[in-house]
Image (cartoon, rainbow, N blue to C red):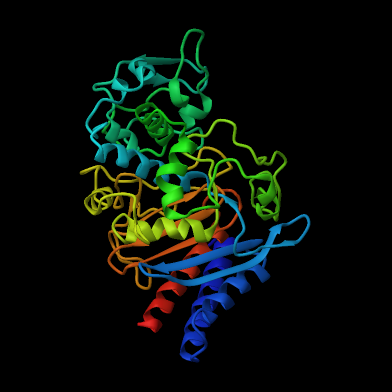
């Protein structure tokens, strides 16, 4: 067995013992989680972590450990701002569903009805990685709004597709949203730039810039005052540094990225880019746990929230993708071929002892930020780290211990 994996398994066993022992010793609520997360930082598994557990009514736990910047040792605070990357996608999906509720767009509408640039989409019929040669064909059907909400459009990312990584467009070929389709819409699930299309649909249908729309219709009503694409200068000291594991294979110590993001996101997209805090994202999660409403502000109808949490890919399943670039590890956190996808969320299929219920909704961001919402148990958790590669083995191990600790905390309180 790989030495690194063996070490992680041993560490998780020690953590499980720590969590159980702390709970049995009648320590204050959250003490076991504090101890486990602090220990992960002290072992240098991760440089820093902020975590929060919420019920429908209130925050049950929050904690911050480690540093926000490995170069300076700046302490990580509970109100630290993280670039949440693809955790932007559920926000964009909620925005689109608000417009669906208003009857301004429908899930079964061809997306090209609103975005004419999609009319020229082509499917890769063949690709020769040695020569770079490729052929294209028309799609069997135009992708619908739902196809983009569910990552079944046929689009990809360079880090989720070797074809997208290696294909160089010929003169005269233009691929909106990053590249040609890998398959006919609806045939498969493949993680992709699809939510960038959803963001453009929000802008086109609403007539508002994406960040303006989010602020007026989601962030303002939910009092998510620390969530934005461009981080104000006054909040810059709270922004966690962009970091990555060193080494050619990103398997060394965590260091600063050589080209970090600045405060400004000049052209916001639906698929990523937001900065947020654990508390702000916790409010977003509580809204969903409460059927679209939080503290008297209704963002979505309850039936819309329920619809978003249903399987919308039918017999198609979500595969545990292999990474095509070192900035991401393989998608090992997915129950390969069993998990499903709703309108903006991964849907958990299996019950794992001590963890979330089947039907829970989740996703993450490439810098190792993650969340889950468990409607059956009425709780959710968000854990934020800030380094590449995505799905780093040690980051996932910390996520696992946090989730198990969250359910032990909830069980002890009840």
Q: Is residue 183 left or right of residue 203?
A: left
Residue at 68 percent of width and 43 percent of height? 248
Please identify the quarter of the rendering in which residue 260 is found: top right
Q: Residue furthest bottom?
A: 25
User: Measuring 70% from the left and 56% from the top, which residue is drawn there?
Assistant: 253
Q: Is residue 331 visible?
A: no
**Front-lying residue, 39 or 237:** 237
Residue drawn at point x = 24 percent, y = 44 percent: 312
State left or right for residue 296 relative to residue 409. left
Q: What x and y, as percent, mark residue 289?
A: 33, 61
| Relative image position of residue 333 (x, y in whole percent) | 43, 55
Residue shown at the point (55%, 72%) measured from the top left: 10
Q: Is residue 256 left or right of residue 155?
A: right
Q: Judge by depth and name the residue closer to the eye, 96 or 233.
A: 233
- 75 over 89 or under it: above or below: below
> Compared to 191, does 35 lie above or below?
below
Q: Splitting the image into 4 quarters, where does residue 252 fall?
A: bottom right
Of residues 227 and 150, the one nearer the viewer is 227
Residue 73 visible in the current orientation? yes
Q: Is residue 135 above or below residue 307?
A: above
Out of 1 and 369, give the one closest to the viewer: 369
Screen quadrant of the C terminus: bottom left
């Amino acid at each position: 067995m790989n030495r690194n994996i063996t070490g992680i398994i041993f560490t998780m066993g020690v953590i499980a013992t720590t969590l159980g022992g702390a709970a049995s010793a009648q320590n204050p609520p959250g003490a076991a989680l504090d101890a486990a997360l602090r220990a992960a930082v002290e072992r240098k598994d991760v440089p820093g972590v902020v975590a929060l557990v919420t019920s429908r009514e209130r925050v049950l736990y929050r904690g911050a450990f480690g540093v926000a910047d490995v170069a300076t040792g700046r302490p990580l605070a509970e109100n630290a701002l993280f670039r949440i990357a693809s955790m932007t996608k559920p926000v964009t999906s909620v925005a689109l569903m608000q417009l669906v509720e208003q009857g301004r767009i429908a899930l079964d509408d061809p997306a090209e009805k609103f975005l004419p640039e999609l009319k020229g989409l082509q499917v890769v019929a063949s690709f020769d990685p040695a020569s770079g040669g490729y052929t294209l064909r028309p799609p069997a059907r135009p992708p619908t709004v739902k196809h983009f909400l569910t990552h079944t459009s046929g689009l990809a990312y360079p880090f989720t597709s070797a074809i997208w990584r290696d294909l160089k467009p010929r003169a005269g070929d233009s691929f909106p949203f990053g590249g040609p389709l890998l398959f006919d819409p609806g045939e498969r699930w493949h993680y992709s730039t699809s939510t960038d299309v959803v963001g453009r649909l929000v802008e086109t249908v609403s007539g508002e810039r994406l960040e303006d729309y989010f602020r007026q219709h989601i962030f303002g009503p939910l009092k998510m005052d620390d969530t934005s694409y461009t981080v104000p200068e006054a909040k810059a000291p709270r922004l966690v540094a962009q970091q990555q594991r060193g080494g050619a294979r990103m398997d060394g110590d965590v260091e600063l990225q050589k080209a970090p993001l600045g405060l400004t996101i000049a052209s916001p997209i639906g698929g990523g880019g937001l900065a947020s805090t654990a508390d702000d994202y916790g409010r977003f999660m509580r809204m969903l746990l409460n059927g679209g409403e939080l503290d008297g502000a209704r963002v979505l109808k309850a039936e819309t929230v329920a619809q978003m949490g249903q399987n919308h890919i039918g017999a198609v399943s979500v595969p545990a993708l292999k990474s095509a670039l070192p900035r991401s590890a393989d998608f090992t956190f997915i129950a390969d071929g069993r998990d499903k996808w709703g309108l903006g969320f991964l849907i958990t299929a299996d019950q794992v002892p001590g963890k979330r219920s089947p039907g829970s909704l989740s996703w993450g961001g490439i810098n190792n930020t993650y969340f889950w919402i468990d409607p059956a148990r009425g709780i959710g958790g968000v854990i934020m780290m800030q380094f590449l590669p995505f799905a780093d083995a040690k980051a996932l191990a910390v996520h696992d211990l946090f989730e198990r600790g969250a359910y032990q905390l909830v069980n002890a309180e009840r």
